[in-house]
Image (cartoon, rainbow, N blue to C red):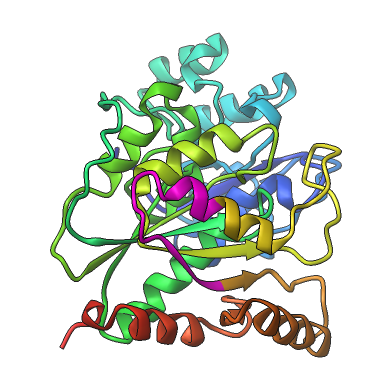
Amino acid sequence: MQIATPYLMFLGDVPDRLAAKTAYGIVDWRPEWCVGQLRLPGCAADLGIPDLTLAEAMAKGARTLIVGVVNAGGVLPEHWVASIVAAIEAGLDVASGLHTRLGSVPAIAEAAERRGRRLHDVRHSDERFDTGKGTKRPGRRLLTVGTDCSVGKKYTALALERGMRAAGFDADFRATGQTGVFISGRGVAIDAVVADFISGAVEWISPAAAPEHWDLIEGQGSLFHPSFAGVSLGLLHGAQADAFVICHEPTRTRMRGVQHPLPSIREVIDLTIRCGSLTNPDIRPVGIAVNTQALDEAEARAVLDRLAGEHDLPATDPVRFGVEGLVARLAALFPAGAAA
């Protein structure tokens, strides 16, 4: 799948920042690809890039409209269709990470056919996956896991890729969600894979590799989330992780979108080891990544110090404070993992 850049980011009228996390992720990691944003009245998210009309975006060289939003069920709201059709009429391709296929909407399909524009449904793969086998394969793997969804698993894996490469590791980010695929240009949206093939799809994403190579696998959901635990478990088994980083948002008391209380970091560590041991008995935690965006610096450092002491693991906000401590722990635990 080759998606033409630059992008015009479409946010619709999403109610909050988290609902536009796909768009934020792309802007954070590929800002050079994003010429501006297109928002509908009432939109509560702002990417901090110019608001553009379709004509202005085309004048700046935009080639693809990215539907940069997430919502429960991955549905395409009917009142967004007119904006997407208008983008096609203006000459843009359209790419979406929603479960709803763009081509399943008659008005969008007809406009794309008539104008000769491409529709990209990143959530859907044409690849056929085997069931997971759990057979030990060469190479090393790190999985980001979470106390909840939307706590920074993708950002942590991307930050680790950058930090580990700078430290001499042979490491690659492996995308398992639509935003990661937009950012990296490869991967599979695991939550759109038929359940029997989730672990097999992860084995396909992270195949056998050189013994010292690290795949940094983007986690999804949480083993404790009643909506997404099935995806999280299949991903854990397929990843066959040697190491994992626990990702956490310290101001939450309940899991996003449900009434269940947030699990503790200790509960996540224990359950991840218990379940992950099925395909890798040597799985171990190597650090804690905390999204401290809602805290001032003093509060953030206090939380990180407390968690590091409680769990005897390095704790950091990968975006705010870097990943040096996590990389150092990996180098200490897996000394052959760094290139000579």
In the picture, which quadrant includes the C terminus?
A: bottom left
Q: Residue at x 63, y 81 (%)?
A: 320
Q: Magenta segment range?
A: 272-287
User: Residue 182's x, y, as percent?
Assistant: 43, 48
Residue in front for this viewpoint, 289 or 11: 289
Q: In the image as oriented, which residue stretches furthest toward the top?
A: 106
Query: Can you say whether 112 is above or below 226 in the image?
Result: above
Q: Is residue 315 above or below residue 215?
A: below
* Location of residue 295 (image quadrant): bottom right
Rendered residue at 16%/57% (across/down): 209
**Residue 56 located left or right of residue 227:** left
Quarter of the image containing the N terminus? Answer: top left
Please indicate, yes or no, whether residue 35 appears anywhere in the rendered image: no
Q: Residue at x 69, y 65 (%)?
A: 48
Residue 270 visible in image:
yes
Find out whether residue 196 is within the magenta segment: no
Q: Point out residue 130 in the picture as x, y percentages from the top left corner.
A: 25, 26
Q: Return the residue nearer the eye: 207 or 98.
A: 207
Q: Magenta stretch: residue 275 in it?
A: yes
Snapshot quadrant of residue 217: bottom left
Give the residue displayed 79% in from the left and 38% down from the top: 257
Nearer the observer, 109 or 149: 149
How far across and down, in percent of the image, does residue 134 sit? Answer: 28, 40
Along the horizontal axis of the image, is 176 left or right of 166? right
